[in-house]
Structure formats: structure tokens, C-alpha cells
Image (cartoon, rainbow, N blue to C red):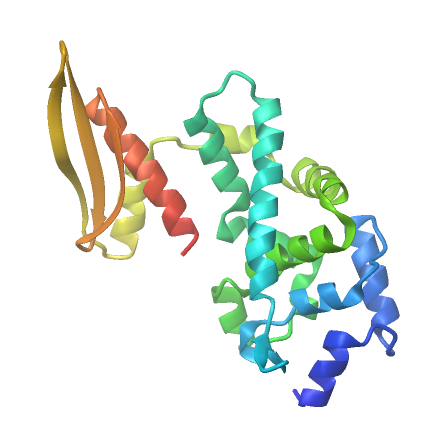
Amino acid sequence: MPIKKLLSLFGQINKPGDKDFKSWIKSISGYGPKNLALYQQAFFHSSVSVKRSGAFVSNERLEFLGDAVLGAIVADYLFGLFPYKDEGFLTQLRSKIVNGQSLKELAVKFGFNTFLQATLTKDEKTKSSAYGDAFEAFIGALYLDLGFDKTKVFVIQRIIKIHIDLDELVKTNQDYKSQLQIYCQKNKFNLEYKLLSEERQGSNKMYVIEVHINNKAYTKFESYSKRTAEQKAAQLTLEELSKE
């Protein structure tokens, strides 16, 4: 795509076609945009980044911000919705909502694939995290443009309550070790649970377990139950892998 066209898409908010883009934003978010350039930036993949003031600009910074904002909103919502569930339950459920595959599917549902600017082929876009990244970048743009409260309304009312089946997510398999084993077998990775320490504390033993995949250390967890330590370490590793 010619650089002039990229620049016009990026920074000028009253050019032909902008009216349709504004209407689309309002139709999915419920709010009319104030600073259209923020949303335009959300759809610029790093493969077509624009150079401004000596630096290349893409949607990566907005993606970083949107990831944090989305995670905070979902965490707050689940915290209130499940007042008696522990941290592990809430963490797993949040991860299922905001993981890369879920965000990619949401992005396609909302039509983000139509606006994404990238030099990737259609197949590369589908297989990469580009759609999910654009979704997070859009959340970042919405937050900067309209504030936290309106972004929270969008996430809860137009994403979670309409497109996320929480009951189904809660029912899904919570055996993290099995999930991690399946993931590693599928990708032909070597999985190992290493016992880092086993210390007696009174009448109990404290076990510290660390997950290793292809000899790379991921996460560790300690518990008086070796099985619990392995399950929690597997859970945290799955969450880490979902961000890669």
C-alpha cells in the first residue's frame, strides 16, 4: 500500500471513507469516536507501520494498553460475579475469555478483519495473532478516547454478555496437567515437572514444582500437596503459553 495512503488512513479524520469507519465503530461499541486517528492506528499491523518523528508507529503500543485494560475489566467483573471462588478459578476463567484464540474469534465476529492493514496474506493473518492483537489495540484506543467507564460498559455489555458463554467455560475441563500434556503432545514438546524442593514444615511437607518444556523453565508453584503444586504450575504455564 502506498505510503501516502497509509498516512491518510492514519492521521486525517475527515477524508472520504471515514464516515463509514466512524459508523462501524459506533455500531459495535455503542459510542461515536472522538479521536478517529486512535482507532485507525489500532488497525495498523507492524508489517505496515508508519514512520513518524523518526519512529515507526503501529498498533503494538495500543495492543499493550488494551491487553491490560481488558484484563482488568474482566478480572473485576468475574471477581464480583463469583464472590466465593478462589484465585485459581478466577484466573483460569479470565484466561479463557481473553486468550489469543478467543480474541481472534471475537475480532472476526466484529469485522476487524475487514479493516486490518497488514502485508500478511489472508492465511498468515488467520494463523497469526494479528486479529486478536487488533482487538486488544481497539480496546486501548477506546480507553484513551472515551475513558475506562465506557470501555468497561463495552466489554461487559457487548462482549461478555453477548458473545461469551460463562456457564460453558466454567464447565470445561479444569485438569490443567491434562490440558498441558495434550498441548505438548500436539506440538511434540517434551514436558517435565521438576521437584525443586521438598521441605518438611512441622508435620507437613512443602513441595515446590517447576514446569519445564523442551528444557525451558516456565512457572513454578509451591503447596503442601504435590498434586496441587503440579496442577497450579501447569495452569500458570498454560496462561503463559496463551500469551506467546
| Residue toward you, 210 or 235 | 210
Residue at 48% across / 65% down in the picture? 128
Q: Height in image: 73 above or below 5?
A: above
User: How many marks can you see?
Assistant: 0
Q: Height in image: 132 above or below 234?
A: below
Q: Height in image: 223 above or below 98?
A: above
Q: Position of residue 41 (x, y in %)?
A: 68, 68
Q: Considering the image in quadrants, where does the N terminus appear?
A: bottom right
Q: Height in image: 175 above or below 183?
A: above
| Residue toward you, 39 or 161 | 39
Residue farthest toward the top in the current orientation of the protein:
203
* Left or right: 21 as drawn, with respect to 144: right
Residue at 66% across / 64% down in the picture? 42
Q: Position of residue 160 (x, y in %)?
A: 65, 38
Q: Position of residue 116 (x, y in %)?
A: 65, 70
* Left or right: 225 as drawn, with respect to 79: left
| Residue 8 placement: quadrant | bottom right
Residue at 61% across / 23% down in the picture? 81
Residue farthest toward the front in the current orientation of the protein:
53
